[in-house]
Amino acid sequence: MAIDYQVMVEVTQFERTMGGEVVLVARWRIAAADGQELMRRTARFSTPAGGQDYEATVTAMSRTLEALSRDMAATVQSLVQQAPAREAYRSRNNATREESAVELSPPGGS
């Protein structure tokens, strides 16, 4: 299976605060299959734990992870929808560069 996009995530904070909310801070980026970075983002999500017990904390942590996942999924979907336009732009630029190189070659070769 070919890889179209690569998503890299660095979680810098994921904890329950003394104030009773769960905080998730993550830096993430998306790269194309060729390694070209398409976007980079820092996201911060917080969710009230709604209780002092472990179950409430775990539930809030799950919701913050869900929010990050949805944000990343929406961004990838947007990139997929933009891909045809991005490829057409690259093709035009590559064709223009090749034409320019031919025009700049001296007459008679080398």
Image (spheres, grey):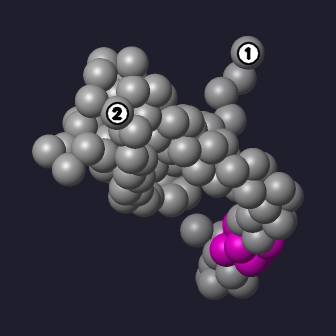
Q: Is residue 31 magenta?
A: no
Magenta span dominant secondary structure:
helix
Front residue of this view, candidates 100 and 71: 71
The secondary structure type at the circle numbered 2 is: loop
Question: Circle 1 sits on which residue?
Answer: 1
Give the residue drawn at x 82%, y 66%.
85
Q: State whether residue 32 appears in this view.
A: no
Q: How many circles with numbers are drawn on the protein?
A: 2
**Mark 2 to mark 1 CA distance (whole Å):** 44 Å
Give left or right: position of 66 versus 76: left
Question: Circle 2 sits on which residue?
Answer: 51
Neighbor class of circle 1 (other Cα within 10 Å; few <14, some 14-19, many 20+) is: few
**Magenta segment, which residues?**
92-99
Q: Above or below — where is 107 with respect to 41? A: below
Give left or right: position of 43 versus 104: left
Q: State whether residue 97 appears in this view.
A: yes
Q: Above or below — where is 7 with respect to 1? A: below
Q: Which mark is residue 45?
A: none
Neighbor class of circle 2 (other Cα within 10 Å; few <14, some 14-19, many 20+) is: few
Give x and y (percent) for residue 61: 40, 32
Give the residue drawn at x 27%, y 30%.
52
Front residue of this view, candidates 2 and 13: 13
Q: Amino acid at mark 1?
A: Met
Give x and y (percent) for residue 106: 63, 82
Compare marks 2 and 1 and give the one earlier in the sequence: 1
- Determine whether label 2 and label 1 are within 8 Å by CB: no
The C terminus: image quadrant: bottom right
Front residue of this view, candidates 87 and 38: 38
Give the residue drawn at x 68%, y 35%.
4
Q: Above or below — where is 105 with respect to 13? A: below
